[in-house]
């Protein structure tokens, strides 16, 4: 048994070090505090949701159904978390290589990993199920006992979804244990999670009261443990007993599934996918197009880069959307007469957000990492090499900005006249930022990373690029001062023009002085 | 084909990693570049390929100054580094097509060459797979295929035989010999004295950044009346 706990400790340590690496912090004191802080911050909206559920269901006179509802939500949440987690922990773990030869029972290897997932799920439970359970218990008059029952409830509920997830992973693994699929899987489940949380929030309105109570009752019949949860918070020992039996059964099942997963992991780590003969495409492509494609693929094919980019691009839109959906924000609030200007500024703000919040160019060289030498030995002008990086950033950001602009233009009651100056301004801003950020990367290339998160997060390049962004506000301000008679469109137009001239200047410096600096970057 | 004039490099401003190196490699030659670990071979090759700017000196490739017209100079050579660190999230075939595009390999020759070289190095079955599923040796072979594809006049390799299986090593040596017979030039660094002895026309020995000797293999051997190994040890030890 001592060996088993040593294994668990090892798995936990690895989990936390991976998590820290994901955040890009070191093992310093501050680096150790940060993960805890982010976890706490992440927990706040969930705890909030739990409270919300309690209040709603209390208002409808069925507080105990709130527990059942939350058990169901937690069930799906845990499955969506556990499946990609189990997948990477069991099928894509590098530690088998040194663990397998050790004199430890194979059963332990599989189960030690399981403990990490179980702890993680229980942690989730503590922020979403525990609060509502505690409140319902207190409301039911259990007083101090409700604390004990809610604690027990949080501990017994994760095992069934864990078992079902392990079955799902086993099924998925027979289809494919491909690395690419793993990343796709994480992405799909991350979106499913987001959808679930958003959906659960949005459904929770008083208009939906009848339907929600109905659904929950029906789902409880489909998944009886949700009903047992409601019994437990009312102090039912029978409910606890049922859960206990279910836990033991699931534990048995898990022993089987983890053993199977462990075995297939060993097979996969040695085996290669079947070779297939595909007809290749030998058609030539344009050189410049190939360079852009390369830089785009570097972003798209590296999940860390891709997620970071998508999140940065979509964040303001998402915040807006959530605001609209939750009713805190309404289109009507923009329609107050005389508020056209506010509407316009809002539009410009959202359309400029991709340029202002992302900094793809600030890591355009860094992202290439150890493969940076490749383009340097090819017969390509250094300036072309740099330009391809800038244009890749522009391509990504502008596509998104235009999309946002057009969608908003269709949705909001805006003047047709506005389209031109706004698009002009946003385009110029995007080009300026994409060009200027690269200067930072030329001065601070960092190519020897092994963990992709270190290349794009928490590094000085990113901070520097964000630091000068607020200064850009000076431009429209100056325009407003210099052209007091100009209206908003005029100011946007003049600002765009100034940005254009500034871009020309930066490009000139890049072409003449900084190309040489680029050529000196040691590899 | 390749001329180095007083080429020097220092990383820290104090110690010279390469010290006033002078070399002339003729077209049609296989030129071996040998020296103990840390002698400055990789540093020299990085300077030749434009990866590292020399601290001083001039590098001419096919009559073109690398510092003045780098693109023109780079059209004249391809390079295989001592590590196969490339962008690995694409398929092998995508990598080769990329290189072919960048070096303007004509469409009509592209397919035949890719098939020929990948079959020669037995990686044709893996071309449809992502490069990060390749073994170290397979990546190296892919890089070699990429470097052969443009059929540039000069072929620069840094320790190309380390990590290759015997058959692939034999094939590569054959290709090097053939390339030179057809008028091409090969410049490669190595630790494998037997290989250098076997295929090189001329060798240069470098030690602690300085050129120790540069001559035809048989002339060096005649002058010392020993095996190349003994000569190498003798030349590089007394420093
Ligand atoms: N990036 C670097 N920064 C500082 N010094 C370096 C760097 N690269 C190489 N050196 C130094 O330059 C000298 C020459 O190194 P180089 O890599 O050229 O040797 P080499 O002949 O290729 O050796 P090996 O046979 O081990 O490949 C060594 O003393 C090394 O310490
Ligand atoms: Mg070397």
Image (tube, coloured by chain):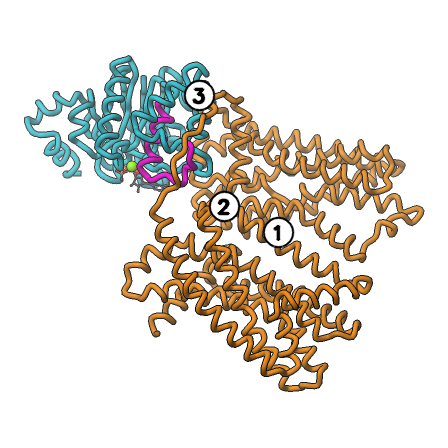
Chain colours: A orange, B cyan
> Magenta residues?
B128-148
Discs 3/2, front: 2
User: Which label belongs to residue A191?
Assistant: 1
Ligand 1 lies in quarter: top left
Q: Secondary structure at mark 1?
A: helix
Whether A130 is drawn above or below B159: the answer is below
Q: CA distance from mark 1 to mark 3?
A: 42 Å
Q: Which residue is mark 3?
A: B103
Magenta residues, dominant SS class: helix
Up/down of A61 relative to A281, above or below: below
User: Which quarter of the rendering shows the C terminus of chain A?
Assistant: top left
Q: Are marks 1 and 2 on the same chain?
A: yes
In the depicted structure, whether residue B194 falls above or below residue A120 = above
Please state if B124 lies on the left or on the right of A234 as rendered. Answer: left
Say few, some or many: other residues with alpha carbon within 10 Å of mark 1 (under 14 / 14 to 19 / 20 or more).
Answer: few
Q: At 44% from the left edge and 49% from the top edge, which residue is drawn?
A: A174
Q: Position of residue A178 (x, y in %)?
A: 45, 45
Q: Residue furthest right?
A: A337
Q: Chain of mark 1?
A: A
Q: Residue at x 62, y 56 (%)?
A: A193
């Amino acid at each position: 048994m001592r060996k088993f706990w040593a294994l668990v400790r090892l798995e936990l340590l690895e989990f936390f070090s991976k998590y820290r690496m994901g955040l890009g912090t070191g093992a310093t004191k501050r680096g150790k505090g940060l993960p805890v802080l982010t976890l706490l911050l992440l927990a706040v909206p969930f705890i909030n949701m739990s409270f919300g559920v309690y209040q709603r269901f209390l208002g409808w006179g069925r507080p105990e159904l709130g527990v059942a509802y939350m058990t169901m939500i937690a069930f799906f949440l845990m499955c969506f978390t556990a499946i990609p987690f189990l997948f990477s922990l069991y099928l894509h773990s590098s530690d088998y290589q040194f663990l397998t030869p050790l004199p430890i029972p194979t059963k332990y290897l599989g189960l030690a990993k399981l403990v990490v997932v179980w702890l993680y799920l229980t942690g989730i439970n503590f922020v979403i199920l525990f609060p509502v359970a505690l409140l319902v218990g207190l409301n039911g008059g259990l007083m101090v006992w409700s604390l004990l029952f809610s604690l027990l409830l949080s501990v017994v509920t994760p095992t069934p979804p864990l078992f079902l997830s392990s079955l799902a992973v086993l099924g998925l693994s027979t289809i494919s244990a491909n690395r690419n699929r793993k990343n796709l899987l994480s992405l799909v489940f991350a979106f499913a999670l987001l959808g679930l949380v958003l959906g659960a929030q949005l459904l929770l309105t008083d208009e939906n009261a009848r339907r929600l109570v109905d659904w929950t009752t029906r789902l409880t019949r489909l998944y009886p443990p949700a009903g047992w949860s409601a019994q437990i918070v009312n102090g039912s020992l029978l409910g606890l007993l049922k859960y206990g039996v279910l836990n033991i059964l699931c534990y048995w099942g898990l022993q089987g599934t983890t053993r199977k997963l462990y075995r297939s992991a060993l097979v996969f780590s040695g085996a290669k996918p079947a070779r297939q003969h595909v007809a290749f495409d030998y058609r030539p492509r344009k050189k410049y197009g190939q360079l852009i494609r390369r830089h785009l693929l570097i972003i798209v094919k590296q999940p860390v880069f891709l997620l970071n980019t998508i999140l940065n691009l979509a964040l303001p839109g998402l915040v807006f959307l959530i605001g609209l959906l939750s009713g805190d924000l309404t289109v009507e609030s923009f329609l107050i007469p005389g508020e056209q200007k506010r509407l316009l500024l809002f539009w410009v703000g959202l359309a400029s957000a991709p340029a202002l919040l992302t900094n793809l160019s600030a890591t355009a060289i860094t992202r290439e990492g150890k493969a940076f030498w490749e383009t340097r030995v090819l017969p390509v002008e250094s300036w072309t090499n740099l330009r391809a990086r800038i244009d890749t950033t522009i391509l990504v950001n502008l596509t998104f900005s235009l999309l946002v602009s057009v969608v908003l233009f269709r949705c909001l009651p805006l003047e047709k006249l506005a389209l031109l100056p706004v698009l002009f301004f946003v385009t110029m801003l995007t080009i300026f930022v994409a060009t200027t950020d690269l200067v930072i990367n030329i001065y601070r290339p960092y190519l020897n990373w092994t963990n992709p998160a270190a290349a794009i997060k928490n590094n000085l390049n990113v901070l520097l690029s964000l630091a000068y962004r607020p200064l850009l506000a000076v431009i429209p301000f100056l325009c407003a001062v210099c052209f007091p008679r100009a209206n908003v469109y005029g100011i946007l137009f003049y600002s765009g023009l100034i940005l254009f001239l500034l871009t020309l200047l930066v490009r000139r410096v890049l072409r003449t002085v900084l190309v040489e600096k680029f050529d000196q970057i040691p590899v | 084909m390749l001329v180095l004039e007083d080429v020097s490099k220092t990383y820290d401003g104090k110690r010279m990693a390469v010290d006033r190196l002078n070399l002339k490699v003729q077209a049609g030659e296989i030129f071996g570049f040998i020296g103990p670990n840390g002698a400055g071979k990789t540093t020299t090759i990085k300077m030749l390929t434009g990866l590292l700017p020399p601290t001083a000196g001039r590098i001419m490739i096919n009559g073109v100054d690398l510092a003045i017209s780098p693109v023109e100079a780079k059209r004249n050579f391809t390079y295989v580094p001592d590590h196969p660190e490339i962008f690995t999230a694409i398929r092998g075939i995508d990598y080769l097509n990329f290189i072919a595009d960048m070096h303007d390999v004509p469409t009509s020759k592209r397919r035949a060459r890719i098939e020929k070289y990948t079959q020669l190095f037995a990686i044709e079955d893996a071309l449809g797979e992502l490069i990060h599923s390749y073994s170290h040796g397979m990546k190296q072979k892919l890089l070699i295929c990429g470097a052969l594809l443009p059929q540039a006049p000069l072929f620069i390799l840094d320790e190309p035989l380390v990590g290759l299986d015997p058959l692939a090593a034999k094939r590569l040596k054959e290709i090097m010999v053939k390339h030179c017979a057809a008028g091409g030039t090969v410049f490669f660094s190595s630790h494998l004295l037997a290989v250098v002895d076997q295929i090189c026309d001329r060798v240069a020995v470098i030690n602690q950044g300085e050129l120790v000797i540069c001559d035809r293999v048989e002339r060096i051997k005649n002058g010392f009346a020993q095996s190349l190994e003994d000569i190498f040890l003798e030349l590089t030890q007394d420093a």
